[in-house]
Image (cartoon, rainbow, N blue to C red):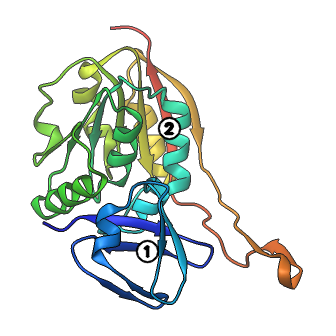
Amino acid sequence: MEKKIFLINSEASLWLDINKDSNTEFGIIKSEQLKKAKAGSKIKTHIGKVFFVVEPSAPDLFRKMIRLPQIITLKDIGSVLAYSGIKANSKILEAGTGSAFATCVMASFAKEGKVVSYERRGDFAKVANKNVALYGLQNVSIINADIKKGVKQKEFDFVLLDLPDPWEVIPTVIKSIKVGGRLCTYSPSIIQVERTLKSLPASMKVERLISTVENNWKVDLSRDILRPESDGITHTAFLLFSRKIEK
């Protein structure tokens, strides 16, 4: 069975299969070295290049995921984590799994809890399960079904809807949110947001509507470069957060 290990140094990061020798641009790394290595171990290539073994985190795994056409970006999932109230034992419901990046990050935070994610498309559900396996998560259930047909589970702390028509799902999922729990919709268009707002019942109080922008900077002090990049991640979607205040 293929087992990967993650190595870093100042020049690069490497994902290597521990069961075979790896011929990299930085030199050959023997399988026997990788099999003995643990987090924090120093690994040398045959030409003396040094790497360190580390446990990969969300930004590292993000680059290795199988990606479908649309994903929730890192900047947006950061806002979801900040405003959702997710904690270690949270029970989370998601609809529109896609590549499962948001699924995996939320499950990583709610390690003692559970993420139940509905994905209507079978091909997307297969990709999602592969990405969940990449993260090594045991607290995720990908359900290949249309959430509009109903949700059996109840008492969720947080619900994330990454769907083109969340207003059609809200009447179904609200029944599954506990009082005090939150709902977030991820919508590229403000027209979608307006329609979603109009669909919210009195039991749901709007907390915030945000759109995050990421400005990356180019950093190369050896060349006296410290300035904003000419491009960046501007608008991707609106995040509408609401909270259940009564049954």
Asked if the residues shown at circle 1 and circle 2 are in contact, with their CB atoms under 8 angstroms apart, the answer is no
Is 146 situated above or below 234? above
Q: The C terminus lies in which quarter of the figure?
A: top left
Q: Which residue is mark 2?
A: 81
Quick check: can you spot residue 69?
no
Q: In which quarter of the view is residue 28 placed? A: bottom left
Q: Residue at x 47, y 58 (%)?
A: 54
Mark number, residue 14: 1
Q: Is 179 or 14 nearer to us in this picture?
A: 14
Q: Amino acid type of disc 1?
A: Leu
Q: Amino acid type of disc 2?
A: Leu
Percent position (x, y) of residue 87?
Answer: 44, 26
Residue placed furthest toward the top: 246
Q: Is 17 or 156 nearer to us in this picture?
A: 17
Q: Is 218 or 167 nearer to us in this picture?
A: 218
Is 3 situated above or below 193? below
Element assignment for label 2: helix
Question: Which callout, 1 or 2, points at the residue further toward the start of the chain?
Answer: 1
Q: Residue at x 52, y 50 (%)?
A: 76
Residue placed furthest toward the right: 224
> Left or right: 122 with respect to 48?
left
Percent position (x, y) of residue 34?
Answer: 33, 68
Mark number, residue 247: none
Q: The N terminus lies in which quarter of the figure?
A: bottom left
Q: Residue at x 28, y 65 (%)?
A: 35
Quick check: can you spot residue 126?
yes
Q: Is 23 or 81 nearer to us in this picture?
A: 23
